[in-house]
Amino acid sequence: MILPLGRWILRTACQQLVSWSEHPDTAHLTIAVNISAAQMHHNSFVDDVLGILKQTGAPANRLELELTESLLIDNVEQTIEKMLLLKAEGIRFSLDDFGTGFSSLNLLINLPLDTLKVDQSFVRDMHRDARDLAVVRTIIDLGRSLALNVIAEGVENLDQRDALQRFGCRSFQGFLYARPMPIEAFASHSNTIPPYQGL
Protein backbone atom coordinates (compact mmCIF):
# COMPACT_ATOMS: atom_id res chain seq x y z
CA MET A 1 0.00 0.00 0.00
CA ILE A 2 2.98 2.33 0.36
CA LEU A 3 2.87 3.62 -3.22
CA PRO A 4 -0.82 4.64 -3.42
CA LEU A 5 -0.71 5.84 0.19
CA GLY A 6 2.41 7.88 -0.55
CA ARG A 7 0.73 9.54 -3.53
CA TRP A 8 -2.34 10.34 -1.43
CA ILE A 9 -0.19 11.89 1.31
CA LEU A 10 1.74 13.96 -1.21
CA ARG A 11 -1.44 15.15 -2.94
CA THR A 12 -3.01 16.06 0.40
CA ALA A 13 0.09 18.03 1.40
CA CYS A 14 0.10 19.89 -1.92
CA GLN A 15 -3.58 20.74 -1.57
CA GLN A 16 -2.81 22.18 1.85
CA LEU A 17 -0.01 24.28 0.38
CA VAL A 18 -2.48 25.69 -2.15
CA SER A 19 -4.88 26.55 0.66
CA TRP A 20 -2.12 28.23 2.67
CA SER A 21 -0.88 30.17 -0.36
CA GLU A 22 -4.22 31.98 -0.57
CA HIS A 23 -3.74 33.69 2.81
CA PRO A 24 -0.95 36.18 3.65
CA ASP A 25 -0.48 34.76 7.16
CA THR A 26 0.25 31.24 5.89
CA ALA A 27 1.61 31.75 2.36
CA HIS A 28 5.21 31.45 3.61
CA LEU A 29 4.70 28.03 5.26
CA THR A 30 6.26 24.84 3.93
CA ILE A 31 5.26 21.21 4.30
CA ALA A 32 7.73 18.36 4.64
CA VAL A 33 6.64 14.93 3.42
CA ASN A 34 8.47 11.73 4.36
CA ILE A 35 9.43 9.65 1.32
CA SER A 36 9.95 5.91 1.58
CA ALA A 37 12.59 3.90 -0.25
CA ALA A 38 9.83 2.16 -2.22
CA GLN A 39 8.59 5.51 -3.50
CA MET A 40 11.98 6.95 -4.32
CA HIS A 41 13.15 3.85 -6.16
CA HIS A 42 9.94 3.46 -8.17
CA ASN A 43 10.32 4.29 -11.86
CA SER A 44 7.46 6.80 -11.85
CA PHE A 45 8.48 8.75 -8.74
CA VAL A 46 9.61 11.94 -10.44
CA ASP A 47 6.61 11.95 -12.79
CA ASP A 48 4.28 11.27 -9.86
CA VAL A 49 5.59 14.22 -7.86
CA LEU A 50 5.60 16.63 -10.78
CA GLY A 51 2.15 15.43 -11.87
CA ILE A 52 0.69 16.08 -8.42
CA LEU A 53 2.24 19.54 -8.32
CA LYS A 54 0.73 20.34 -11.71
CA GLN A 55 -2.69 18.93 -10.81
CA THR A 56 -2.92 20.81 -7.53
CA GLY A 57 -1.11 23.99 -8.53
CA ALA A 58 0.97 23.85 -5.34
CA PRO A 59 4.07 26.05 -5.12
CA ALA A 60 7.01 23.67 -5.57
CA ASN A 61 9.35 25.79 -3.45
CA ARG A 62 7.09 25.24 -0.42
CA LEU A 63 7.34 21.44 -0.66
CA GLU A 64 10.17 19.60 1.09
CA LEU A 65 10.72 15.88 0.65
CA GLU A 66 12.33 14.11 3.62
CA LEU A 67 14.66 11.20 3.00
CA THR A 68 16.28 8.90 5.55
CA GLU A 69 19.82 7.57 5.50
CA SER A 70 18.55 4.01 5.05
CA LEU A 71 16.88 5.06 1.80
CA LEU A 72 20.30 5.98 0.42
CA ILE A 73 21.89 2.55 0.83
CA ASP A 74 20.82 1.36 -2.63
CA ASN A 75 20.93 3.08 -6.04
CA VAL A 76 22.59 6.24 -4.76
CA GLU A 77 23.40 7.59 -8.23
CA GLN A 78 19.81 7.08 -9.38
CA THR A 79 18.50 8.75 -6.22
CA ILE A 80 20.72 11.80 -6.75
CA GLU A 81 19.60 12.01 -10.38
CA LYS A 82 15.94 12.05 -9.31
CA MET A 83 16.62 14.62 -6.61
CA LEU A 84 18.31 16.93 -9.13
CA LEU A 85 15.35 16.65 -11.52
CA LEU A 86 12.94 17.63 -8.75
CA LYS A 87 15.19 20.37 -7.36
CA ALA A 88 15.25 21.92 -10.84
CA GLU A 89 11.50 22.47 -10.35
CA GLY A 90 12.03 24.15 -6.98
CA ILE A 91 11.38 21.22 -4.62
CA ARG A 92 13.55 21.06 -1.51
CA PHE A 93 15.11 18.02 0.21
CA SER A 94 16.01 17.21 3.78
CA LEU A 95 17.92 14.30 5.29
CA ASP A 96 16.01 12.96 8.29
CA ASP A 97 17.44 11.13 11.31
CA PHE A 98 20.98 12.09 10.40
CA GLY A 99 23.63 10.23 12.39
CA THR A 100 21.61 7.05 12.95
CA GLY A 101 22.42 5.29 9.67
CA PHE A 102 25.48 4.46 7.65
CA SER A 103 25.79 7.20 5.05
CA SER A 104 29.30 8.56 4.53
CA LEU A 105 30.38 12.17 4.62
CA ASN A 106 31.28 11.83 0.96
CA LEU A 107 27.68 10.90 0.22
CA LEU A 108 26.41 13.81 2.29
CA ILE A 109 28.57 16.23 0.32
CA ASN A 110 27.24 14.91 -3.00
CA LEU A 111 23.55 14.90 -2.11
CA PRO A 112 21.61 17.96 -3.34
CA LEU A 113 20.18 18.68 0.12
CA ASP A 114 18.71 21.82 1.65
CA THR A 115 18.21 20.64 5.23
CA LEU A 116 19.90 18.34 7.72
CA LYS A 117 17.87 17.04 10.67
CA VAL A 118 19.52 16.09 13.96
CA ASP A 119 17.89 12.89 15.22
CA GLN A 120 15.86 13.21 18.41
CA SER A 121 17.78 10.38 20.10
CA PHE A 122 20.85 12.65 20.31
CA VAL A 123 18.85 15.71 21.37
CA ARG A 124 17.00 13.80 24.09
CA ASP A 125 20.16 12.64 25.87
CA MET A 126 22.55 15.49 25.16
CA HIS A 127 22.31 16.88 28.71
CA ARG A 128 23.10 13.47 30.22
CA ASP A 129 25.63 12.07 27.78
CA ALA A 130 28.70 14.01 26.68
CA ARG A 131 28.95 11.85 23.55
CA ASP A 132 25.43 12.76 22.42
CA LEU A 133 26.20 16.40 23.11
CA ALA A 134 29.32 16.15 20.97
CA VAL A 135 27.37 14.51 18.14
CA VAL A 136 24.72 17.23 18.22
CA ARG A 137 27.31 20.01 18.09
CA THR A 138 29.22 18.24 15.30
CA ILE A 139 26.10 17.77 13.15
CA ILE A 140 25.11 21.41 13.60
CA ASP A 141 28.62 22.59 12.70
CA LEU A 142 28.75 20.23 9.74
CA GLY A 143 25.39 21.36 8.40
CA ARG A 144 26.23 25.02 8.74
CA SER A 145 29.62 24.46 7.06
CA LEU A 146 27.80 22.91 4.10
CA ALA A 147 25.35 25.84 4.00
CA LEU A 148 22.44 23.59 5.01
CA ASN A 149 19.53 24.50 7.24
CA VAL A 150 19.79 22.38 10.41
CA ILE A 151 16.67 21.27 12.27
CA ALA A 152 16.89 19.66 15.70
CA GLU A 153 14.21 17.02 16.27
CA GLY A 154 12.67 16.02 19.57
CA VAL A 155 12.94 19.42 21.27
CA GLU A 156 10.70 19.11 24.32
CA ASN A 157 11.77 21.90 26.66
CA LEU A 158 13.30 25.37 26.69
CA ASP A 159 16.61 24.14 28.11
CA GLN A 160 17.12 21.92 25.06
CA ARG A 161 16.11 24.69 22.69
CA ASP A 162 18.37 27.26 24.35
CA ALA A 163 21.35 24.90 24.29
CA LEU A 164 20.79 24.13 20.62
CA GLN A 165 20.46 27.82 19.92
CA ARG A 166 23.85 28.44 21.56
CA PHE A 167 25.36 25.79 19.26
CA GLY A 168 24.06 27.69 16.23
CA CYS A 169 20.88 25.73 15.47
CA ARG A 170 18.07 27.98 14.28
CA SER A 171 15.20 25.56 13.58
CA PHE A 172 13.47 23.19 15.98
CA GLN A 173 10.86 20.44 15.89
CA GLY A 174 9.21 18.75 18.84
CA PHE A 175 6.62 18.74 21.59
CA LEU A 176 7.83 22.11 22.90
CA TYR A 177 6.04 23.55 19.89
CA ALA A 178 3.22 21.08 19.24
CA ARG A 179 2.05 17.53 19.33
CA PRO A 180 0.49 16.06 16.19
CA MET A 181 -2.85 17.74 15.53
CA PRO A 182 -5.56 18.06 12.87
CA ILE A 183 -4.86 20.79 10.33
CA GLU A 184 -7.99 22.61 11.53
CA ALA A 185 -6.34 23.12 14.93
CA PHE A 186 -3.09 24.46 13.49
CA ALA A 187 -4.15 28.07 12.90
CA SER A 188 -5.22 28.67 16.49
CA HIS A 189 -2.24 26.78 17.92
CA SER A 190 0.39 28.66 15.91
CA ASN A 191 -0.23 31.75 18.04
CA THR A 192 0.90 29.89 21.19
CA ILE A 193 4.34 28.76 19.97
CA PRO A 194 7.12 29.80 22.39
CA PRO A 195 8.99 32.78 20.91
CA TYR A 196 12.50 32.33 19.57
CA GLN A 197 14.64 35.33 20.42
CA GLY A 198 16.82 34.90 17.35
CA LEU A 199 13.97 35.66 14.95
Image (cartoon, rainbow, N blue to C red):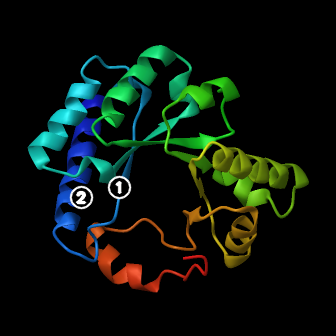
For the question of whether residue 102 can be seen, the reply is: no
Q: Are marks 1 and 2 in contact (CB under 8 Å)?
A: yes
Residue 144 lies, with reference to residue 197, above or below; the image says above
| Residue 21 shown left or right of residue 181 in the figure | left
Disc on res. 31: 1
Q: Nearer the viewer, residue 179 or 167?
A: 167
| Kind of residue indicated by mark 1 | Ile
For the question of whether residue 15 can be seen, the reply is: yes
The image quarter in which residue 101 lies: top right
Task: Say what secondary structure mark 1 lies in.
Answer: strand
| Residue 123 shown left or right of residue 73 in the figure | right
Which residue extends farthest left?
Answer: 55
Q: Residue at x 39, y 80 (%)?
A: 189
Residue 107 lies, with reference to residue 93, above or below; the image says above
| Residue 186 shown left or right of residue 103 in the figure | left
The image quarter in which residue 127 lies: bottom right
Q: Residue at x 57, y 32 (%)?
A: 69
Residue 75: % across, % down:
48, 14
Q: Which residue bears the numbered disc 2?
A: 17
Task: Say what secondary structure mark 2 lies in.
Answer: helix
Residue 189 lies, with reference to residue 132, above or below; the image says below
Disc on res. 135: none
**Crowd tier of the residue under label 2, counting other residues whose Cα lies within 10 Å: few below 14, some 14–19, many 20 or above:** many
Residue 169 lies, with reference to residue 73, above or below; the image says below
Marks 1 and 2, Cα distance to the nearest angstrom?
Answer: 7 Å
**Crowd tier of the residue under label 1, counting other residues whose Cα lies within 10 Å: few below 14, some 14–19, many 20 or above:** some
Residue 15: % across, % down:
18, 54
Q: Residue at x 37, y 68 (%)?
A: 181
Q: Earlier in the sequence, mark 1 or mark 2?
A: 2
Residue 103: % across, % down:
65, 27
Residue 199: % across, % down:
54, 76
